[in-house]
Amino acid sequence: MRRLKNAQMQTLALDASSTTPLHQQLFLGLRQAILEGRLTPNTRLPSSRSLAADLTVSRNTILSAYDQLTAEGYITSRIGAGSYVSGDLPDDLLQRKGTGAVPRLAKREIYISKMAASLMGSPVPRQYRGLPFSPGLPALDEFPFEDWARLLARHWRRPKREFLVDNPVGGSQVLREAIAAHLGQTRAVRCTADQVIILSGSQQAIHLVVRAFAEPGDSIWMEEPGYPGVRDAIIAASATPVSVPVDEEGFSLAQAKILAPQARLACISPSHQYPLGQTMSLARRLDLLQWAKEEGRFILEDDYDSEYRYVGRPLSSLQGLDEDNRVLYVGTMSKVMFSGLRVGYMVVPNDLVDVFLALRRNIDSHSPSVPEAALADFITEGYLSAHIRRMRLLYEKRQSCLVKLLGEKLGDILTINTQESGMHIVAFLPPAIPDSAVESAAIASGMLIRALSGFYNSPTDQNGLILGFAGTAEKEMPQLVDKLAHIIRNLSK
């Protein structure tokens, strides 16, 4: 056994101004010395008193570091003899030398699935955390957080026993009942609570639906342009996305049959097409339902922000027209409340409930129960409906304000497509100004404006901007539109 010499402790410099606690700094320093071989096995460490005196720290700091080293197996304590570097450390661990930098990964061959291989090298999307003009961003500052906090507190102070153990796979019964009633009243969805499955968001629902119906290689219809998350889900299931162009009446069944007559599933947003905003005509809705019935196929209806309609009442859902149980209805609370809540839902036909509960169980056995209980109260006690009514009026004003400003500042360049519903508008650009260049420059300037061309899977001449207005205050819009105008006019030179 060797006693620790003073020279071996010289590198243990503790910084009192660091945000890392002193005991953690000491633990990391001693661990690194052991890993690098500067402290060899069976070396005796200084007593806690003497090391505390040498480093001018409290003895508790030393004891905390030693306790952590002992718990992780780096040192051992011997009664009456002190603390020693463990003699049982693996040889390959003791051979680690250097400064502790992350080792470079040597090039190697790895077998992964075809689906995973298709994702290698894909950039991870950046999260911009609610920049102005973000499509789909609600007015977070207008949400009734006091009411929401009170409902959460109600259930956290005296939680029922069933909310403290595993939640049902489909979500809490009270929330499923509340959502079924809410959808029946507002979207003409016909369902019972048992048909509702609570999920972490609409994307999880889309993944489950695609996996339920698609075998590898199967064709699945999606809208062109359309929500990128649908394409991602199709590819993740090793199926083949088939992009079906939309026109002024929305998704075209005739075009879809030409492109892929044997498609297993149709993924559409009939009430408010994303991102162009069309509403699917009644004739096309009925034709699509008839196709599903005759061919034994199913339809995924993504109803993501249809609550916000500014002309007349919100349109009824496609699911409400379905007489043969062929529609799987998907919705989310992200647009009417906030995305951080992570609550989505799907409504499935009765004879498919067990299948989807099993699929969900394989991915995530259950969702958090106490927030679901609070959300159920938020819906049943009228807070959600009242909030949606207020936001519908507010968003209509914000849309009008944005359209007016864009017309004043960029009316000679942009062709603005106003929409009767939703939380964004589309402004078309002339071919000489690439929408992708505007998107990049806007992000660099602190605005999230999406390039329309990025929502097409096939090469396109469409060139425009998707601007969200719901989450951007009117008082901020003049300055923001000035900034956007400066970007566009510079790119037009």
Image (tube, grey):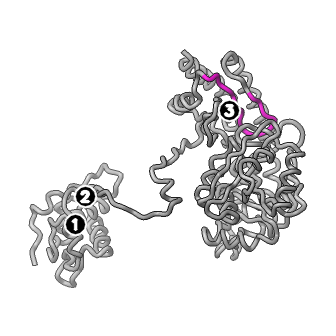
Residue 299 location in percent, x, y?
A: 77, 57
Residue to which mark 1 is pinned: 35
Residue to which mark 2 is pinned: 100
Q: Is residue 116 above or below residue 363?
A: above
Q: Are marks 1 and 3 in contact (CB under 8 Å)?
A: no
Crowd rating for badge 3 (residues with CA inside 10 Å; few <14, some 14–19, many 20+): some
Q: Is residue 3 above or below residue 385?
A: below
Residue 457 location in percent, x, y?
A: 62, 43
**Given the image, on which type of amino acid does mark 3 rest?**
Ala
Residue to which mark 3 is pinned: 473
The quadrant holding residue 111 is: bottom left
The answer to whether residue 153 of the structure is visible from this angle is no
Residue at 16% of width from left, 75% of height from top?
Answer: 41
Residue 172 location in percent, x, y?
A: 73, 69
Residue at 23% of width from left, 80% of height from top?
Answer: 77
Dot 1 or dot 3, earlier in sequence: 1
Q: Which residues are magenta?
A: 417-431
